[in-house]
Image: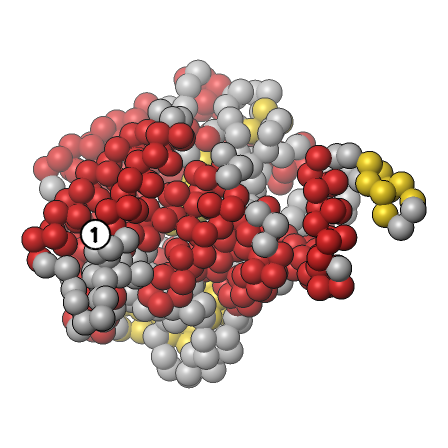
Amino acid sequence: MTVEKMDPVEVFAAGEKGRGLRVTEEISTGDVVFAEASFAAVVFDSLSLQVCHSCFRRQANPHRCAQCKFAYYCDRTCQRAAWDEHKQECSALKKIGKAPNENAQTAHKDTGLVSDAQLTTLDLLEDHLSKMSPEDLKELKVDVQHFYNYWPKKSKPVGEDYVSHLFGVINCNGFTLSDQRGFQAVGVGLFPNLCLVNHDCWPNCTVILNPGNQTALDASFHSKRRIELRALGKISEGEELTVSYVDFLNVSKERQRLLKQQYYFDCKCEHCTSGMKDDLMTAVRDTDGHKPSADVVKAVTDFSLRALVKIEEARTEGNFHEVVKICRECLEKQDPVFGDTSLHLLRVLSTASEVLSFLQQFTEAAGYAKRMVDGYTKLYHPNNAQLGMAIMRAGVTHWHAGLIEAAHGLICSAYAVLIITHGAHHPITKDLEVMRTQTEMELCLFKQNELVYRSMREAVLSDKPMMLAGEQIKTTS
């Protein structure tokens, strides 16, 4: 494991929070505070056939390891880059004939090696075993048994107490890894230095996965998969580094409940103790000073909660037209009652815009996406990565709908956020740069002659020949 630059950070005693990390010099907005390769990382079981086990990129036709027939890679280059990490589990998988669960795979990849740049060890990280419920401890014992079934008999014996500690650390400190486009969680990894960064619901940093680069012919130019801790704003010398362990889009009490359940601490950040933005998240419609009664709000809230369950069931079954039907019915009831920043409303708008885009009903999807982004903008930190991703998706939806002016504006807004949270060289930012250039060109044409723009767009979408200024232009989709 390597950390590319650790000079600007140091470990310090953070009071009730235990240890923490703080900066030893001023950090500018968008700077990488530090980068860290994974100590251990695995692809989710459900996606093991679709995601490269080295760089975590999604692949349509990945290359399979011929020995264990479990691990998949982009190509032989990615496979060679992962061999040092994979070789020990490869022999175990080949012998057993099947893979254990994700936790056992992650624990098995614990090499015990410590680099000079590592600020802590797994031994020193909290496992919170004493705070676990009987049900959680029962699941942990199952994981421990899987580990021993998987551990090579000829390898150095590992004590049960240490293995239990390891699983406790994984449960509390595992970092979810997304694919190269940031749209889907595809795995989990352990990053010991990152584990020292404490939580805040309104943090000064964000964490992204850089999948690395294995495409260069010269292996010396290859870069490893790593996380990057990036500054969301200026961080003063001596200031503690923080990230958010949960999505901010929950009222403070719900965030506190989630944090207590998963990470075993009581959040006392400013936003939780003062309930900041809770009023916006639970806002009701105010029409000329008249608000709906408490009974009406409760009835629509209960209806929304039931509808969200039905929506998820329909999505799981792949019944997307039913999803749209439920969303429309729900929005009809919500719109007269909930404010524009209500979480219940925003969740339905998000689902409706996503599913309608999938069904290529882009005009209706764009309307919902715009309302969603307007609500998110009032709630999220202005440089929040999830906000940037939501704005990007809304921009693409507007682009597909032919709303080029709004599309270009949204894509530019998304780029302004994601250049901070992801950096200029991340695949997502590179995609956005291409989209920004393309929509700018289309917008120029639109402003010069809207009729010509509409004609060209229709020709591209239908893949038909188009007559322009007396010449036949063959367009392709």
- In this orientation, which residue lies closer to the viewer: 284 or 242? 284
421 left or right, relative to 312: right
Q: In which quadrant is the C terminus drawn? A: top right
Q: Is residue 278 left or right of residue 56?
A: left
**x and y percentages locating residue 399 in the rendered image:** 60, 51
In the picture, measured across the screen, residue 269 lies left or right of residue 468, that is left
Crowd class of label 1 (few under 14; some 14 to 19; many from 20; radius 10 Å): some
Q: Nearer the viewer, residue 419 or 243?
A: 419
**Residue occupying image coordinates x 67% and y 32%:** 76
> In this picture, is 292 found above or below 133?
below
The percent position of residue 431, horizontal first and vertical second, equals: 63, 52
Instruction: Name which residue type carries label 1.
Output: Leu
Q: Quadrant of residue 351?
A: top left
Look at mark 1 in the image and give the residue it sits on: 258
Is 162 on the left or on the right of 459, as rendered?
left
Let me know if residue 17 appears in the view. Answer: no
Q: Is residue 19 visible?
A: yes
Residue at (31, 61) in percent of width and height? 340
User: In this rendering, is residue 76 above or below 99?
Assistant: below
Q: Which residue shows up at 16% across the image and 37% down it?
A: 137
User: Please, what secondary structure does the residue beneath circle 1 have?
Assistant: helix
Residue 222: where, in percent of width, then height? 67, 49
